[in-house]
Image (spheres, rainbow, N blue to C red):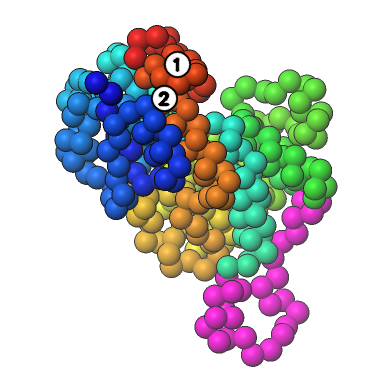
Amino acid sequence: MRRQVLAARAVFPEAIARLREHFDVETNDSDEVWPQPELIRRLQGKAGVFVTGTEKIDEPLLAACPDLRAVCSMAVGYNNIDVPACTSHGVLVSNAPDVLTETTADFGFALMMATARRIAESEHFLRRGEWTKWSVDMFAGSDVHGATLGVLGMGRIGQAIARRGALGFGMKVLYHNRSRLDAAVEAQLGARWVDKATLLRDCDHLVIVVPYSAASHHLVGTAELALMKPTATLTNIARGGVVDDAALAAALRTRRIAAAGLDVFEGEPQVHPALLTVPNVVLTPHIASASIPTRRAMADLAVDNLIAALGAGPSAGKPPTALNPALLGHA
């Protein structure tokens, strides 16, 4: 009998077709975000599940789904998945790193530039029919070229953003990370490690790309925003909760900092109401990796992981990006 798997969100037909070569697949063609009881119900009898960043895989779900052996996400972040709990239940977990690095860095840099140059604010002004004349200071923002770029979190995406800043825009690059990069990598990126307070004080444009965890919750809040230049911008493409959205909205309203660009939010898809009332913020709905080629690559990697994790395909037993590889061979 073929094993059963669930695709918890709608995904490219080609990805489903690949899964159907090996498994009986239940799909979510209406792309509903199922509440937890419904997700648990649909996982009964399923050996594997294809997820995104919206499905919560936690201890109660695992306890209620004893047949589950693999949780494979097409996202790079996995704070919605309790990996230790999965490991204790013998459930292999995978994510989709690397394939979205460059596209996400492109978007992060674009969001930073839109924030610095007040693009969204000026577009809204134009659409409202308020543009009646040109003036010297009309929506004058801040330069990106030659400015100081601060990168908070220097993993793959942070390094890709640093490269764009240093090589493409002649920016001075400062970064803060839990661990310092090798000197050769720093030299290649033209980046200098500084402590967090120095990063916040000295940067003209801060880009946040740290993973979310309990330790990074509200990593940037009122105290951190108070350290930044009043002319500085903040761009968050990391995860909601890394920035205290209420504190950020207050800082934007009082012009404690000049502007912000946000692709992620606490409690998304809900957005803090105060952020919707300040003009000096660019808001996008968690789309940093949203190019068609990249989303296809993310889905394909999740499919590769699920097929391999459940012992099928040419890479049987060797999913390429397992997060708890000690379980390999037990799915």
What SS does tag 2 mark?
Answer: helix
So how many labels did they put on this image?
A: 2
**Gap in Å between the C-alphas at discs 2 and 1?**
7 Å
Query: Left or right of 126: which side holds 319?
Result: left
Secondary structure at badge 1 equals loop
Q: Which amino acid does label 1 sit on?
A: Ala
Name the residue nearer the viewer: 202 or 97: 97
Please identify the dominant SS of the magenta region: loop
Task: Give, as a single range, the part of the protein colored magenta.
Answer: 121-147
Q: Which residue is drawn at 44% across and 14% down?
A: 317
Q: Residue at x 80, y 50 (%)?
A: 169
Q: In this view, does 52 lie above or below 264?
A: above
Which residue is disc 1 drawn over? 316
Residue 58 appears anywhere in the view: no
- Res 268 visible: yes
Label ID, residue 257: none
- Residue type at mark 2 is Ile
For the residue pair 287 and 259, the one nearer the viewer reads as 287
